[in-house]
Image (tube, rainbow, N blue to C red):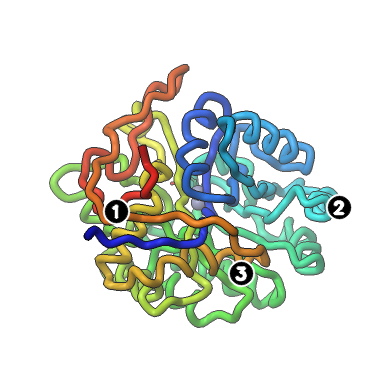
């Protein structure tokens, strides 16, 4: 008999849904498996105001196929011009679940992000007062800092001081990738959480760079060393309650990744829960998956767990080489395309 695992319907606490044709193409893959997702605001132009988020949420719901249930949890893209009153209104009206800090030019579509953190201290003060969550892309952009060290240096130069200045502000260090990040999160109090992607648990930078360069494994923060991956795996293994599922599924047109200057982001949504199951199983802690995928994140965000369930079956399958989006996007290539995945969501057609 194939092994199975049934878990409460999970949530994705870090997701890029994009807009237009891409949104329509990628949303079903998430909605099939996840009940809710923290939707990233780095559109062009970004989702900055409450009105922007209301309009984007409507476009997401309009793109949801008939008969599918899904709740997008909206985030505000923090800029140096963000109005704290508008943010507070957005939280009060139930539009915003979190605010997202992108250091300017740290990652995809972050040009409107924050240069000098001091300029947004009034926003942090307000967030701390209303107990709104701040999600952070934790990398410095200092050109002198090696790309593999940018998370560790961000923690030292920016995150640690920020936590001292706003000790009651609830923060999620998004897509943690390094031992320095894992150590910092583990040592912190219960107002700091973190998400981790499937790829950062599964592989290290060798998978991206040895035997040829694999642009579809290029994301930010970049894949690190084996010891970094293993520090993240250790937190998973002990069932660390402030580390939870956030895929960072970030679709880009295939031709823009297979490019002289390829863009950052892995499209993991069609295989995400299965990939986590596979790596948890490899670590020997599959029994930790329900808490990681369905409980820890909701608890950190103060949300009730979902009512339904999803069942995984140990059954090999192969994700498609590409998914046709159409329009000027063309195709997108999912994580683990063409490879054998050992776990499968039971009702997958
Ligand atoms: C994300 C994207 O493409 O929007 N890319 C990535 O490499 N992770 C942005 C982000 O989450 O930093
Ligand atoms: Zn990011
Ligand atoms: Zn992201």
Residue 106 visible? The answer is: no
Q: Which residue is drawn at 51% across and 63% down?
A: 294
Say what secondary structure mark 3 lies in.
helix
Tell me if the residue at label 2 has its CB under 8 Å from ligand 2. Answer: no
The picture places residue 267, in percent across and down from the top left corner, at 40, 41
Q: Can residue 346 be seen in this view?
A: yes
Q: Which mark sits nearer the N-terminus, 3 or 2?
A: 2
Q: Identify the residue under disc 3.
A: 299
Q: Distance between the residues labelled 3 and 2?
A: 27 Å
Query: Residue at the spot x=42%, y=61% of the render?
Result: 6
Compare marks 3 and 1 and give the one earlier in the sequence: 3
Classify residue 92 by image quadrant: bottom right
Give the CA distance from mark 1 to mark 2. 46 Å
- Badge 3 density bin: few <14, some 14–19, many ≥20, Cα 10 Å: some
Q: Is residue 18 left or right of residue 271?
A: right
Mark linked to residue 85: 2
- Residue in the foreground of this view, choosing between 327 and 173: 327
Which numbered dot is residue 343? 1
Element type at mark 2 = helix
For the point 68% across and 38% down, the residue is 57
Q: Residue at (72%, 49%) from the top-left corner?
A: 80
């Amino acid at each position: 008999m194939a092994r199975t695992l049934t878990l409460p319907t999970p949530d994705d606490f870090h997701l890029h849904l994009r807009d237009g044709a891409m949104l329509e193409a990628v949303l079903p893959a998430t909605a099939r498996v996840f009940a809710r997702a923290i939707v990233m605001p780095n559109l062009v132009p970004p989702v900055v105001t409450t009105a922007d988020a209301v309009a984007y949420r409507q476009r997401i719901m309009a793109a949801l196929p008939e008969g599918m249930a899904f709740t997008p949890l909206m985030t505000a893209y923090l800029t140096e011009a963000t109005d704290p009153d508008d943010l507070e209104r957005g939280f009060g009206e139930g539009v915003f679940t979190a605010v997202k800090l992108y250091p300017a030019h740290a990652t995809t579509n972050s040009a409107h992000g924050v240069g000098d953190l001091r300029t947004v201290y009034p926003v942090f003060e307000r967030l701390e007062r209303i107990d709104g969550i701040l999600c952070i892309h934790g990398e410095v952009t200092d050109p002198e800092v090696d790309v593999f060290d940018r998370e560790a240096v961000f923690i030292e130069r920016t995150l640690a001081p920020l936590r001292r200045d706003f000790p009651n502000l609830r923060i999620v260090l998004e897509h943690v990738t390094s031992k320095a990040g894992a150590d910092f999160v583990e040592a912190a109090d219960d107002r700091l959480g973190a998400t981790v992607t499937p790829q950062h648990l599964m592989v290290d930078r060798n998978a991206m760079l040895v035997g040829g360069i694999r642009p579809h494994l290029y994301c930010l923060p970049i894949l690190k060393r084996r010891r970094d991956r293993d520090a993240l795996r250790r937190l998973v293994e002990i069932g660390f309650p402030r580390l939870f599922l956030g895929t960072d599924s970030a679709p880009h047109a295939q031709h823009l990744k297979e490019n002289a200057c390829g863009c950052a982001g892995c499209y993991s949504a069609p295989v995400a829960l299965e990939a986590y199951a596979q790596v948890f199983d490899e670590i020997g802690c599959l029994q930790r998956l329900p808490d990681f995928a369905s409980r820890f994140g909701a608890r950190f965000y103060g949300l009730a767990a979902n009512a339904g369930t999803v069942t995984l079956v140990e059954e090999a399958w192969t994700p498609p080489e590409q998914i046709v989006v159409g329009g000027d996007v063309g195709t997108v290539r999912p994580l683990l395309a063409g490879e054998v995945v050992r776990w499968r969501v039971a009702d997958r057609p």
